[in-house]
Amino acid sequence: MKKFTLIVCAAMMAAASFAQPEKQNAPSILNGMKQLRTQRQMARPSKAETRQQDMRTARMMKSPLKAEELPEAIVDQPEGKVYEHAILTVNGLFYNWMYGWMSSATDAGDVSIVEGTDGNVYVKGILSSMAVDEVYWLKAEPQGDDLYTIKMQPCGAYWDYQGGEHTYYIARMEYYMDEESGYDDYNITDNTTVTVWYKDGVMKTIDEMNPEAGNVASAAYGPIYWHEAEEDDDYESGWYNNNQFYWSLSTAPLTETYFEPSENATIEQLVMKYKQVDTFYSKTVNVAFEGNDVYLKLYTSVPGWVKGTIEGNKIKVANQQYAGVDSSYGRHTWIHTASVATKYYEDTENPDDSYYYDYGTIVDGIEFDYDAENMVMSTEQAIYFDGARERIYYADYFNALTIYRFVEVPAVPTDPSITNFWNYDDYFGNAELDFTLNNTDVDGNYITPDKLSYVVYVDDELFEADAEEYGMEESMSEFPYGFCDPKGYIGRNYFCVFFAPAKNMGLQAIYRGAGEENRSNIVMYDIESGQVNIIENAGTGIEAISQKNVTSRCEMYDLQGRRVNGNARGLVIERRMMADGTMKAVKAIRK
C-alpha cells in the first residue's frame, strides 16, 4: 500500500497545535506540540470508513457563492514593506472527533506581513497550522481609521491521496443551535468579511470577534472549501468546513535574535546520549567553540544554537534563549533549562490509560560538568525546545544528557519494537508491519546508522523483497537503516508485503561495527494471538521462541487522544497489552 493521508480529517484536527495548557500536565489532552508530526498519519480506514469520516468532519454551509466566483489565490509575496516572522497570538475553537468541541490557543505562531505598495496589507500564516500543502497570502483592504477587511478568499490548498485538489477559503461564519436536530451548527454569514485593526506590523481582530474566554464565539471565521459533487459522491455540492474556527488574533513584530557561532568558530561533531522517560537515546550533534563560548546544535528544526559559557570545569547555560522558528511546526521557539521528574499518571476511571511521563520544571540555568581533555560534557538536568516563552510547551527535550566523542566498538543493536500489524485486505492489497528501529545499542549508546540494517521474517522464513514489486533495481533481503523503496511500500517505520502472512511477521536488527557483526533478538508478531514474541540469541535464523512479558498489542495515540498509526513520529502515547494480559500506557519518542 502506498501511504496516503486523510487530509480532510487531518486538517480538522490540525488546530490542536494551538493547544496550550496553563501548566505542563501530561494527562491533559491539550499538552505538547508533537502532534503536528502525526496529524496526517491516522489509523488506516477502509474506503467506506474514509467516506464516513469525510461526512463527520464536513458540515454543509449555506451560501449563494460558488468557489469559481471568488478571487484567485495570492501565491507570490506582494511588493511592499515586509515584517518577517511576526509573532502570532490566536484563540479559537476546533472539533475533535473523540472529545467534541475544544478551545485552542497559541502565542508563538509564525506569520509574515507586507504593507503593500497598493495600500493593502497582506498576511500569510494565520491559518498555517492547517494540514495543507500550500498556504496563500490573505489581502486586507483598508476601510479607514486603521481598520481593514479580509474578504472571503483562498487561504490554502491540499491534495488528497487520490490526487484531487481542495482549496480552503477564509470566511466569516455564524454559530447557532439547530432546533430541529438539537446540534450546534455553523453557517457562512451574509457578510463574509473579517474586520481587523492594523498598524506598524501589529494586526488584531476587533472587539466583536473577542468573546469572553471559554465561551463559544457568536461570530467566528475559519477555512472552508467548495465541493463539486460527482456521480459517486455521497454528499452534494456545497461549502464544507474543517471544523476549525478562530475568534481572536493579534500579531507583533519579532524583536528577539538567536545565537549561532561565527564563521571562525571550530565545529566538532560529537555524540549526545540522553534520556526520555525510562529510555536512553543517542544521536550526533554539532558543538562549536569560540573562546569561552560553547554552542550546541541539539535540535535541527530551529536555526538557533544553545549557548553556554565555559567557567573552569563547568559549562553554564542560561534559561530562555530564543531559538528561531521551528520548521516542523511553524512556531517561534525558545530554549528552556529544566529539572525533570518522571511521574506516573493514574487514570482511576480507566486504569488501562495510566502511564509514566516526564514532568519538567524550568530552572534559572543549568551547569554541565566539563572534561576538556577528553571532550565530555554532562548534566543530570534537561534542555527543552519550547513553543512558549515562559512555560514548558515542548517540541522536544533532552534529559540527563552526555555529549562526547564517538569511538566505534563492537555493539549489539537494540531490539526493534513492533507498534502495529495490519493484515491483508483487498482494498490496500498488502499486509503491513509498523515498527521502530533506533540507532542505539542495548545500553542506549550511539551506533553508526550507516552500519545498521535489518531483515524481515514472514512465517518463520527470511523474506526477500522482489525488485519488480517494490520498484527497486534488485531484489533485497536486508534493508539499510531508514530505507524507503521507490513505490512507498517500505518506509522508515513500516514494511508491506503483498499477501496475507499465515503465522507471523517480524524483524531483526544487524550492526557491523569495528569489524564485527552482531544481531539483535528477533522480534516477531504472532498473527493469531496478536502477541509479540522475542526469539533470543537467534543468530542468523529462527531457533527457539522465548515468550516474554512483552507487548502483545500496541495502540498509539497522540497527546490529544487521537489514534495514530505506526508510522507516526515524535511524542506519542503507546497503550500496550502485555503478554500476561496486563495493560501499560507510556509516553514514547518515535524517531
Image (spheres, rainbow, N blue to C red):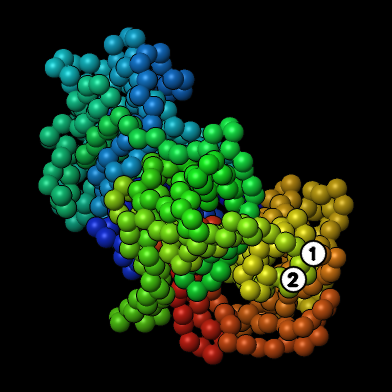
Q: Residues within 10 Å of mark 1 (few under 14, many from 20)?
A: some
Q: Are marks 1 and 2 in contact (CB under 8 Å)?
A: yes
Q: Nearer the viewer, residue 228 or 87?
A: 87
Q: Position of residue 179 (x, y in %)?
A: 15, 52
- What residue is rendered at 56% in x and 69% in y? 280
Kindly state the secondary structure of the residue where label 1 is placed: strand
What's under tag 1, amino acid-wise? Answer: Gly
Q: Pick whichever of labels 1 and 2 is earlier in the sequence.
A: 2
Q: Position of residue 406 (x, y in %)?
A: 68, 59
Label 2, on which residue? 411
| Cα–Cα gap, marks 1 and 2 | 7 Å
Viewer can see residue 23: yes
Residue extending furthest toward the front: 312
Kindly state the secondary structure of the residue where label 2 is placed: loop
Compared with residue 294, is residue 377 higher up or lower down, i.e. above or below? below
Label 1, on which residue? 513
Locate residue 491 relative to residue 287 in the image: left or right. Answer: right
Compared with residue 324, is residue 284 higher up or lower down, i.e. above or below? below
- What residue is rendered at 12% in x and 47% in y? 212
Q: Position of residue 486 (x, y in %)?
A: 74, 47
Locate residue 163 relative to residue 213 in the image: left or right. Answer: right
Where, by quadrant of the figure, is residue 544 drawn?
bottom right
Q: Quadrant of the C terminus?
A: bottom right
- What residue is rendered at 28% in x and 24% in y? 201
Compared with residue 494, is residue 149 higher up or lower down, i.e. above or below? above
